Amino acid sequence: MAKNNAKDIQSLTKMNKLYEKLVNEVDVGIHVINEKEKTIVYNKKMMEIESMASEDVLDKNVLDVFMFRESQNSTLIKALKMGETTRDIKQTYFNNKGEEITTINNSFPIKENGKITGAIEIAKDITQLERVIKENVLNKQNKKFTFDQIIGQSKLIQSVVDEAKRATRTSSSVLVVGETGTGKELFAQSIHNGSNRSSAPFISQNCAAIPDSLMESLLFGTKKGAFTGAIDRPGLFEQADGGTLLLDEINSLEPSLQAKLLRVIQEKSIRRVGDMKDKKVDVRIIATINEDPIDAVANNRLRKDLYYRLSVVTLFIPPLRDRKEDVMMLTQSFIDKYNALFSMDVKGISGEVKLLLQKHDWPGNVRELEHMIEGAMNLIMGETVISTQNLPGWFRGRYLTDEEPINQKDTGDLSESSKTLREKMTEVEKYYVQQVLEKNGNNISKAAKNLGISRQSLQYRLKKFDL
């Protein structure tokens, strides 16, 4: 009898391991909850789709982890509560970092003796595909940036603008080199719109945003029957025919795709995935890279032959720290931009803010400066000048030594003459929200209940305070 029990245990253990391996090896996301809405199965593919670890989800209530739009409910919860089976339903929601996820779901209840004891969801990830479609729509409707919109009077930026303007006369490939946030796409669009291709399409694609398995068909298109579900679809090269194709972060493409890209540039023809025929295309290539191309070649992130083919014209966009004389001009342009967008009438910045902006090294470059001005204008309440109290807390903390960070002992002290009442109250609110959240084990629903506010209000504050 004991031997039979031992064999049964061994067999059960073996089956559990087999089940676990099967669940984690399938190329679809699997998410199972029990009758209390808590996750009991969360496979490896689902972790990849939702960019989360198992400990973030397992044994937690689905609605405490994920956030859904007002108009959408969780298909998984719907299966549990209403006993409904849904098939091939597209759902967009947000993970615990606020990142948007889009999946195609099949959800159905789990029943035992006629009673619903849980629900299971099988999901296919289409997040990246949705982004590609949105980006391509935006590309076709994008603003027509021109050289007039490149802000700066420093010799460094004016020199690059002059070089870029000369590149508008030809159809040669261009390689734009610069750190993230320096405005590489602005230069690429300006070149296109200043050339004789300006009336033709300008298509932009970030090579780092798409997996290699999707990138080839996205670039070159597909032939019906090439693989299951494949239809006749033109790729980005065909869509950009007669115009310009911007390939952002070209060093993110795998070597085999770089080789195919080189062939297209040399032969001026493409072959759709699954097709046997080549098709001529007339496309100007502009590529960007966010590192020194020589380092990229040396470290096998960029093929040497592709580098030589792309770098017929090479533009080096200077980082903002090397052209700080442009900071004030850029700042005013962003104030003007958000005045128009927000229907505000901000005149400028205080002298102290001016000193701080000049002092900062701007690792995020022009993009970081724009986001800082936009953020400051969101905090203005009737003022016409951006002051230090409108700048992000981390920024003030770094440069204003007389501002002490909030701590538990001073949360009730509103007598500090160095801070306004609104500023101090904001700090107190942030501290209290953080404490209540920690007390409730980061459970949003429980914390919101203790605070006497809705989940949405708490989510807003978490985002506002960067918690």
Image: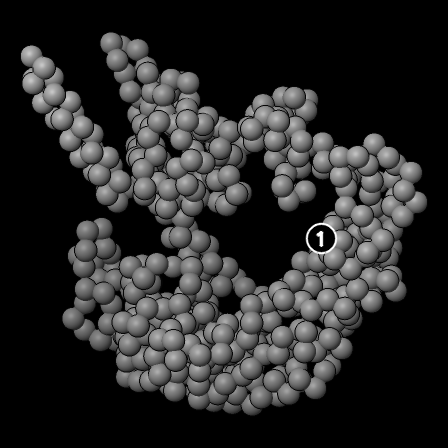
Residue 10 sits in quarter: top left
The residue sitting at 56% across, 72% down in the picture is 179
Within the image, what quadrant is residue 146 found in?
A: bottom right
Q: Type of residue at label 1?
A: Trp
Q: What coloring was used for the rendering? A: one colour
136 and 428: which one is in front? Answer: 428
**Residue pictured at 88% horizontal, 64% vertical:** 351
The percent position of residue 78, horizontal first and vertical second, equals 40, 23
Residue 431 percent coordinates (x, y): 72, 36
The residue depicted at 48 percent of the width and 87 percent of the height is 313
**Place of residue 447 in the rendered image (x, y in percent of width and height, measured from the top left):** 61, 26
**Residue 264 seen in render:** no
Task: Locate residue 324 relative to residue 88 in the image: left or right.
Answer: right
Q: Position of residue 430 (x, y in %)?
A: 72, 37
Q: How many marks?
A: 1
Can I make out residue 182 in this image? yes
* Residue to which mark 1 is pinned: 394
Q: Is residue 69 above or below residue 168?
A: above
Q: Please determine whether, in this image, residue 90 is positioned above or below residue 13.
A: below
Helix, strand or loop status at disc 1: helix
Question: Which residue is nearer to you in this view: 389 or 187?
Answer: 389
Q: Nearer the viewer, residue 249 or 137?
A: 249
Name the residue at the front extreme. 2
Answer with the quarter of the image where residue 462 lies: top right
**In-front residue for pair 346/288:** 288
Residue 354 sits above or below residue 300 on the image: above
Number of other residues with Cα within 10 Å of mark 1, as a class: few under 14, some 14 to 19, many 20 or more: few
Query: Which residue occupies 62% across, 30% down?
Result: 437
Q: Please identify the quadrant where the N terminus is shown.
A: top left
Position of 51 relative to 395 (above/below) = above
